[in-house]
Image (tube, grey):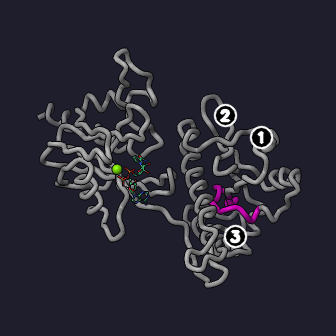
Amino acid sequence: MVAQGWCSSYIKHTRFLFELKENDDLCRQALTSGSFYLFHNLSPLVQKSGSTYHAPAISCSDLLKTLSQYGKDKSTLEESVLLGCSDSCTAEFALDLGKLEQSSLEKELSAEFRDLSKAIVKTDGKNISLLSRAQALLRWHENNQYCSKSGKPTQKNVSGSKRVCSSNGMVYYPQMSPVVITLVSNGNRCLLANQESFPPGMYTALAGFCEIGETLEETVRREVAEEVGLEVDSLRYYGSQHWPFPMSSLMIACQATVKDDKLDINKAELKDARWFSLEEVIEALQVQIMPPKMADGTRPVWVPPRFAIAHYLIQEWVQIQKTRLEEKINI
Ligand SMILES: NC(=O)c1ccc[n+]([C@@H]2O[C@H](COP(=O)([O-])OP(=O)(O)OC[C@H]3O[C@@H](n4cnc5c(N)ncnc54)[C@H](O)[C@@H]3O)[C@@H](O)[C@H]2O)c1
Ligand SMILES: [Mg+2]
């Protein structure tokens, strides 16, 4: 049994959450003293402060007061999913109140429900990962209410770490799809691509879903060959990010090099792909997102903003190029 308030270190937090995930009684108890991030049909509740959004954490007592206005009681809390815990080990949950009327809820809570894909641009870093995780978990539960084998309902455990089929006991765990995102470089230039579905003018590194049975390295080689007709020569892992759009993905970012740089663009996948010099990439990193059209009717090239791992992957490439140039000058 874990008492609240005693844990402060990362390991203690992790052990606390581990118990909550699997122990229904303990998690039920944590609900009554927890804090809640609210959603309405998968749109998070946010408050505007200046030009940024902040997701308010609602205390259990405030939430119960709000729920009582709609004839709901504490049993509604059990529809929540566990997200994590605060420094003082207050359990944090996400709850979707999509069955209640949106505008009256917004009035009651003095905040608005905003589409995450639009709100994310204006949301601060810590809130982005929290809301992404919350939305992905809530969506997974919404989409997995029936067993794919028996067709019978599945039941969520209290924390939401799994669902179990009521008839055959099959256990379902929240899923995400691994996706590689690769910045290809030929030494002096890097390759950025644009898809039909992207906002106008946005270019980014090549991305693609891993296929069953593939290693990460095989996916990178296949995607680069499929999309731009190049053979990867070397590959280095950079970092990863959970990505909630359109479903839950684990973005695995890599830097890759190629020897040959003649592009054969797969038009079924990409609208355009181009080699960019260091100067061009530095310029693109400085362009605001969704820039207005220029005098000639085109838009300046821009890259994904800071909430996307692609941004940091591109920034790292710039940093490496700058360091190389400095080293050359110093020789
Ligand atoms: N966070 C970032 O920095 C960043 C940057 C670029 C792309 N992305 C994301 O990467 C993802 C993949 O990029 P892409 O669209 O070029 O992939 P892709 O090149 O693999 O092409 C998408 C196609 O792959 C197929 N596919 C295979 N497995 C799939 C699965 N599990 N889910 C959905 N489709 C699947 C579908 O036919 C789909 O149309 C996108 O969801 C995009 O939002 C994130
Ligand atoms: Mg792709």
- Towards the viewer: 173 or 123: 173
- Callout count: 3
Number of other residues with Cα within 10 Å of mark 2, as a class: few under 14, some 14 to 19, many 20 or more: few
First in residue order: circle 3 vs circle 2: 2
* In the image, residue 85 lies in the stretch drawn in magenta: yes
Mark 3 residue CB less than 8 A from any atom of ligand 1: no
Please report the residue visible at 31 percent of the width from the left and 52 percent of the height from the top.
254
Considering only vertical position in the picture, is 300 above or below 317?
above
The C terminus is located in which quarter? Answer: top left
Please report the residue visible at 79 percent of the width from the left and 44 percent of the height from the top.
105
- Name the element at disc 1: helix
Where is residue 275 drawn, in percent x and y?
22, 37
* In the image, residue 303 lies in the stretch drawn in magenta: no
- Towards the viewer: 86 or 80: 80
Number of other residues with Cα within 10 Å of mark 3, as a class: few under 14, some 14 to 19, many 20 or more: many
- Kindly give the residue lying farthest to the bottom in the view shown: 168
The nearer-to-camera label among 1 and 3 is 1
Considering only vertical position in the picture, is 61 above or below 263?
below
Considering only vertical position in the picture, is 118 above or below 74?
above
Determine the image quadrant of residue 310: top left
Residue ID for mark 3 = 158
Q: CA distance from mark 3 to mark 2?
A: 31 Å
Question: Residue 103 bears which disc, if any?
Answer: 1
Which stretch is magenta? 77-93
Amino acid identity at mark 1: Ser
Where is residue 217 drawn, in percent x and y?
27, 61
- Name the element at disc 3: loop
Question: Residue 48 bears which disc, if any?
Answer: 2
Q: CA distance from mark 1 to mark 3?
A: 28 Å
The reply to whether the C-beta atoms of the residues labelled 3 and 2 are less than 8 Å apart is no
Residue 315 in view, yes or no: no
Considering only vertical position in the picture, is 308 above or below 79?
above
